[in-house]
Each structure stands twice: as structure tokens, then as C-alpha cells.
Amino acid sequence: ADSAGVVYVGEEKNSAVRKIATDGVTTTIAGTGTNGDIDDVGSRAGCGAIIGLSIDSTGQFLFAADVTYGKIRLIDTTTQRVDTFLTGFSSLNEVLVNPTATQVVVIPWKEVKVYTNDPVTPAPLTMEPTAPTLAPLDLTAGICGTGGDVPGAAGIARFQAANAVIMSPNSPFDTFISDTLSNKIKKMSTVGTVADFSGSGTPGPGNGLAGSAQFNNPRGLTMDGTGDIYVADKLNHG
């Protein structure tokens, strides 16, 4: 949802992105209802199975993870223009944009990729006259297809199965990732350093301090306005 309470839904089977206004009125802002790889406007645009969405703080730029075509699509919610933003992914789990739309985090299988504008003097993204491009900053944590439970700097850290991702709403915009098969929640800094944040790694239902708490197949994440994180813990049914 954006700051005004408008909800956006990625439809995997309908190959579309839907908008639900605050009065409940639902419209399609991208996609035809059938698979298609077409950059265009609104219903003329084609996409595949959309499995993840993230919107910037202005409510204008919506990033969509299209698992069918291995792309991150960028949708201007004002004009409904759809453009290919990033491409070449063999798998996709999630996408997340920071509030200032200067950094995009993408989770393929077992890795976390970060794309950014100039990290020294970032500028907000624009879509005129064409979709923006971001240079990949060398912050990739994990190697696609190579699992592990290893904290450390970018290029050294490993994930067993990075799944959901959330970002702190305030600078420095730290990223939190559920590593499902490691049974941990991990924290990644803006320079790509990964550390264990919560979870001992031993599956179970136990509550406790960060290093002793237990998860069992943690999946979805969300954060409230005070910075507390909530975890959907699949095999603990909680």
C-alpha cells in the first residue's frame, strides 16, 4: 500500500497488477490477463506472473517482480506506463525499493542483489523519456544456487534460501531478510554487510533474545511504524 492507503496487488495467475482504492474500487493498471512480455501503457502492457511489489514513498513508482520473464517491471501509477527496469533473472522471490527510490533490492534464489544510483550523490528515479536504469552496485550477498548460512561482507555472505525482504523506513535504510532454510532473520546494511539479526538457527517455537529465539521456516516479514518486525513463521503456524 502507498502512504494514502491505496493497495496494489500482483496477480500471479491473471498476469496483471491491480489497484484497490480506499473506497474498495478495483482497477487493473497493468497487464492483459494473459502472459505477455510487452512494455506499453495499462491494458496494452503485457506481463507474466507477478509475485512481488514495492512502491516508493511518493506513491508514483511501483516495482513488480515478474517471475515468468525474469524481470523487474517499473510501473508509473500516474500514467500506467509499464517498462522493463531490470532483466536477466533466472528466478525471482521478491523486490523492494527504498523510500527515496534510489536503491532497489532484488531477491533471486539464494542471493540478494542491490541496484543503485550513484551511492555518493543519489538522485530520485525518473521515467522520462524512458524507463530509468540503475547500475548494479557490487553489493551482491550470496551466490545464485550456492546456499549457506554465512554472515559477512558482500560477496562473502551466504543465504540458504533468502525469501522475504523489508527495509527500515528511515535512513540508513537497513534491509531485513528472512532466510527460510537457515531459520533466521538477517540484516543487511546499505554497504552489503550481512549479519544475523534474530534466530539461533535451530528450528523451533522458542521466544527469547535475538540469538536464542527460534523460527521454523520463516517466510513473510512486515515492519510497523516503530521499527518492530513481524514474522510469518510457516512451520510454527504463527
Image: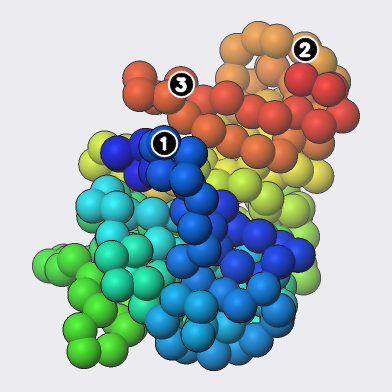
**Mark whose residue sits in front, 1 or 2:** 1
Count of numbered badges drawn on the protein: 3
Q: What element carries label 2?
A: loop
Which of disc 3 and disc 2 is earlier in sequence? 2
In the rendered image, which quarter contains the C terminus?
top right
Residue type of the residue flagged with mark 2: Gly
Residue 8 screen position, x and y as percent = 49, 51
Residue 21 screen position, x and y as percent = 41, 44
Q: Is residue 126 left or right of residue 183?
A: left
Which of disc 2 and disc 1 is earlier in sequence? 1
Q: Distance between the residues labelled 1 and 2?
A: 41 Å
Q: Is residue 78 above or below residue 183?
A: below
Residue type of the residue flagged with mark 3: Asp
**Mark whose residue sits in front, 2 or 3:** 3
Q: Which residue occupies the foreground of this view, 27 or 67?
A: 27
Where does label 3 land, which residue?
Answer: 228
Residue type of the residue flagged with mark 1: Asp
Where does label 1 land, which residue?
Answer: 23
